[in-house]
Amino acid sequence: MATTQTPVPLRDTLRARARRLARLVTTPLVPGDYWSILDPLGSSTDLRGRVEAVLPETADAATLVIRPGRGWAGHKAGQYLRIGVDVDGVRQWRSYSLTSPPRPDGTVTITVKALPGGTVSRFLVHHLQAGTVVQLDQAAGEFTLPATRPAKALFVTAGSGITPVMGMLRDGADRLDDVVLVHSAPRPEDVIFGAELRGLAARGGLRLVERHTDVDGVLDPAELAVLVPDMTERETWACGPNGMLDALQDAYDAAGSGQRLHTERFRPALVAVGDGGTVTFTGSAVTAEADGATSLLDTGESRGVLMPSGCRMGICFGCVVPLREGAVRDLRDGQVTSAVPGDGVLVQTCVSAAAGPCQLDI
Amino acid sequence: MTTIQKQANNQIAHLSAEDIERIGVELDAIREQVIAGRGADDAAYIRRVITTQRVLEMGGRTVLLASLFPPAWFLGTAALTVAKILENMEIGHNVLHGQWDWMRDPKIHSTTWEWDHATPAEQWKHSHNQLHHTYTNVLGKDNDLGYGIMRVDEGQRWHPFHLGQPLWNFVNACIFQYGIAAYDLELGKNLAKSRRGAPEFRARVKQTLRKIGQQVTKDYVVHPLLSGPSAATTITANLTANFIRNLWSHSVIMCGHFPEGVETFERTSIEGETRGEWYLRQMLGSANISGSRLMHVMTGNLSYQIEHHLFPDLPSNRYQEIAPKVRDLFQRYGLSYTTGSLPRQVASAWKKVIRLSLPNNFFGHSEPVRPRGAAPAPVVMRVPNTPEAELVSTSSR
Ligand SMILES: Cc1cc2nc3c(=O)[nH]c(=O)nc-3n(C[C@H](O)[C@H](O)[C@H](O)COP(=O)(O)OP(=O)(O)OC[C@H]3O[C@@H](n4cnc5c(N)ncnc54)[C@H](O)[C@@H]3O)c2cc1C
Ligand code: FES
């Protein structure tokens, strides 16, 4: 087959040359290291964003309006965003569901609930100042509405689990023919987006069932079946504590509708604990004692190792590192993976802990 | 100075093994305090220094585009010189020590940082962090003692070659960054016929040459070319900035371990060394420089060499804060804390280089006089509430 050469436009060649020249004058750094002083959002390789506002939602939740910098590829409602912030001088990354639909002004929002003792969530809700520049990663996640919208939809959420669903509702899910939202929160005033949801329901956009667990108790699938008798016939999106999601999954599986249920988890379900061991991060010349419950990711990070990470809960594989030697335990099921020198088995550091001495290639 | 173990009246003779371990426990406590208090202010400090350095550098280089005009040359060269010094001293050296790794910012991390220096960061980290900081002032182990070309201790054997060492030292000062690159490559040892062809050595030479190539291209080719008619004067500006930085960093580093009063150690003395003994060696093997805040920043806080050697990975901005505590510890245990102004320490170091270019006892007297007199009278106190068990566990580390 003959190939045709499309001439490269002159402007592109000039730009490429200018870039190469800029590299030569800025070595050993890159031009962006200097440029970002003037324009922190201008880098396309290091995605950053500026927090434009922090809006309180409830006593312990707030919405962050963020303007992502150059290189932001957009998102689909229901997806989440990884954000890196410096808390007490230390870079911390966490995931938060996007609560805004894709908007023409280019800003996005996330809504964070401060957890007792939570390093990042409390910082974002109570201390973050508008104007702060934060690190971002592209939106990710499969917890989205399909292109062909379902005729009947059910959303089951609890606490901060409303966030991805709010993103979908704001993106037009309320215009579906038949939408039910069953949301649990301790008290009426704890319902994040309470007023907006009640308004939507009043306008007929959806049927809203609010559960206040302080008086009603925790929702179980049997009660849900009473509230929404045709629940397993509905395309269902659920987000909340792992216990609730596990129970729902069992109920849908039992009804043969397992594939109709889509879940989003905010944290991994960790069960296994064993003996820890000495972890050596070979590339960083760091050695640490770790117990059997602390993830290799946390162990490395606490010693200043530049650990790659993503969702921090075992789904994205953004944290894998070669295990050079020794044994690690998967905290989700207790399975032990071991490697002999030269193996380099890839392990997910966010859900694995040392199971004896081990060496990681980082 | 002779290695401490060979001195008739050495300044650690009065310390018992328990005293030494207690010093270790006290120093560990100082370290823990700083680590517990590291936070947003420290992070803001290093980011501010980095931003200042980058603005100065780019500002200087921009002004130099008109370097044909003498005031522009002076202003641009001054800015570039200060930027280059900050880059190597307060930023590069300290980032490469891992002092800022705790921030977990991939842009300010010892594993990702590359500096404005002839030697590649990776090679420097090995020879400096792993060899020099581990074997500080141990004769035959710490090649920083005279960089393998000079005799800076009575315990080193004299050779007629050393007659020229004042000259070697001066030449090394002028081209210091290349001297360090050669030193990191262990050129002397590796150029011996048997090793010259070793693939590992050749790979490292290639890496260094590549780095030097990039540095030279930046300072002496691209920047001058961008200056157009000012090309020649931009070359002299870059030469000047690099030259002044060489002299400056050479002087600062000489002050760290060469002045009179700094102790050296026998190779055998570090076998089975405890944590306390390691600390003690760092305390006696280093010397500080006293001066203004600006001077400390320009030396990369290596003016707190003693504190730096005790805690190489603590953030440099904290050395100033812990110095009084460390000094108090020296006092209490009857050890001498070597410090002096920059001119005085530089002169002291040079005097040693010149004196030791001649064989020992050349002028007849046996031991050189201690310039800072005898160590203070020991006030050895027991640390209250230090359980014996803790001492044992520390010493067995
Ligand atoms: C895909 C995804 C989307 C997410 N979206 C949101 C969102 O929209 N809004 C939101 O507020 N959070 C969301 N999270 C959770 C968020 O990423 C953090 O885990 C949470 O904010 C806690 O971080 P922290 O640093 O404050 O707590 P940490 O300091 O990490 O933990 C403090 C304590 O809280 C416990 N803990 C950690 N996570 C949770 C949790 N989710 N629930 C209960 N206890 C927990 C820990 O075990 C620990 O004891 C999401 C997580 C994922 C994986
Ligand atoms: S960080 Fe996503 S799998 Fe580990």
Image (spheres, coloured by chain):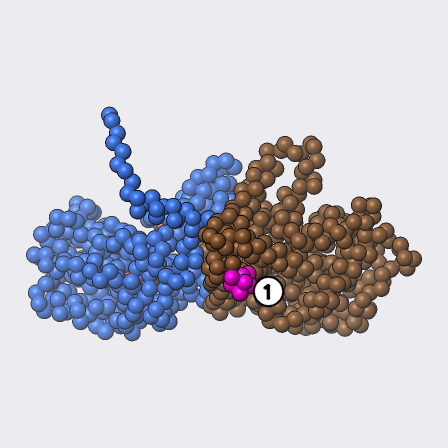
Relative image position of residue A166 (x, y in whole percent): 20, 62
Q: Is residue B74 magenta?
A: yes
Could one spot residue B122 in this view of the protein? no
The amino acid pointed to by label 1 is Met
Chain A: give its colour. Answer: blue
User: Does residue B227 appear left or right of residue A257 in this picture?
Assistant: right
Q: Nearer the viewer, residue B316 or B250?
A: B250
Q: Quick check: B1 above or below A2?
A: below
Chain in brown in the render: B
Question: Disc 1 marks which residue?
Answer: B298
Instruction: Tally the numbered discs.
Output: 1
Quick one: which residue is furthest to the top in this view?
A: A1
Q: Quadrant of the N terminus of chain B?
A: bottom right
Question: Is A169 situated above or below B217?
Answer: below
Q: In the image, is residue A101 part of the stretch drawn in magenta?
A: no
Q: Quadrant of the C terminus of chain B?
A: bottom right
Q: Residue at x 24, y 60 (%)?
A: A106
Q: Residue at x 73, y 64 (%)?
A: B345
